[in-house]
Image (spheres, rainbow, N blue to C red):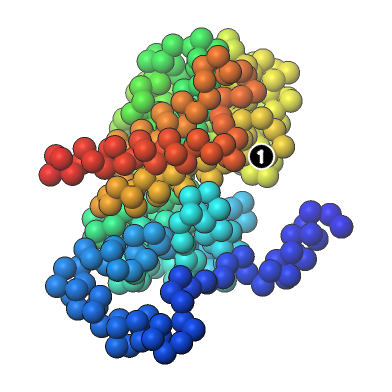
Amino acid sequence: MDKKELALAKHAEWKGKLSIETKAPITNKEELAIAYTPGVAEPCLAIEKDESLAYTYTGKGNTVAVITDGTAVLGLGDIGPAAGMPVMEGKCALFKAFADIDAIPICIDSKDPQVIIDTVYNISKSFGGINLEDISAPRCFEIERTLIEKCDIPVFHDDQHGTAIITSAGLLNACKVTGKKMGNLKIVISGAGSAGISIAKMVMRLGFGEVILCGSKGTIYDGAPYNNPEQQKMAQITNRKKLVGSLADAMKGADILIGVSKPGIVTQDMIRSMAEDPIVFVMSNPVPEIMPDLAKAAGAAVVGTGRSDFPNQVNNVIAFPGIFRGALDGRARKITEEMKEAAARAIASVIPEEELTADYVLPDPFNPLIVEKIAAAVMAEAAKEKEAE
């Protein structure tokens, strides 16, 4: 049985990756009266007077909604909300396994951003956080932005920010391995969708250097006729020389290549055209923009992918459990840019500098220090936010 057949067989056996267990014992009339009527009226009345007590008397403070419309599921594309359910269940299982967070999969049968916004907002009181997942660009930007403004709990689009945080952590360590000095580096990002734009924002915030985004039609520059509104915003702060051309043109002399686009679009000659000892993170899944062995043979000093069978896997499970653990425990109302930066630096710090190598710039997802360090960093930023209010 190959892996595809095994996956189908296991999912049929599991009939879903989640189940619900009760914490409250209900084995006799007294326990029933406490867990349900009439006893349940007391916490209800307390929460009516002070809504924050929902964190004391219910599971709200440890519950996250994992929400999709099924329009950008993994590498499968727009397969619809029902077909996206196995992925959402998987994400919920990871929340529980890595950070002991209870997560609920919710698949919305609409592609209308306003319907999605209204739906999520109207159910948000049940949760301590919202994880948006696999929603296509550029709709995902509007949906997340509006929900952050409306909701009083953290809203986080993992496809954007989780990928950006982990990529940035890997790049911080890769620069140490290669000796590249941050500040004047040239970074090319293949893919100008949600992940590419979020990565661009993060590497600029961290001060790596100049960024050039490349979409399917070429470089993103100010005034490019094919820019969508989100790309046009990025064009005003990236590619300051207004380079017009292909990905190959952009990569000449680049120190870092980040791929969140399509399989096989980067050649060895394109890697050879980069600066000395280039850093190459190619994360198209399951087939990257260039296979790691080919990239290394062409001169890449550090290579990362989205795959588990190569070193330096950029896996979102490294980031989101700890981020939500810290946000929930710190009772954060938003996941701020400062929290994202703190999370990236926390991930990078998991590997001691003396242990860093070209094949080890990102920690193994099962390293127990990851969630601990990220959660502590996010909680510290949440505390600063509260002090500033």
Q: Position of residue 112 (x, y in %)?
A: 39, 68
Position of 300 compared to 142: left or right? right
Q: Nearer the viewer, residue 152 or 49?
A: 49
Q: Residue at x 19, y 78 (%)?
A: 45
Q: Amino acid at mark 1?
A: Arg
Q: Position of residue 348 (x, y in %)?
A: 47, 27
Q: Relative to 109, say whether 39 is above or below.
A: below
Q: Relative to 192, say whether 158 is above or below.
A: below
Inspect this view and state whether residue 172 appears: yes
Q: Examine the image and state in which quarter residue 311 appears.
A: top right
Q: Residue at x 49, y 66 (%)?
A: 105
Would you call the spot at circle 1 few (<14 residues within 10 Å), some (14-19), or many (20 or more)? Answer: some
| Residue ID for mark 1 | 307
Q: Nearer the viewer, residue 172 or 61?
A: 61
Q: Nearer the viewer, residue 75 or 16?
A: 16
Q: Residue at x 46, y 26 (%)?
A: 349
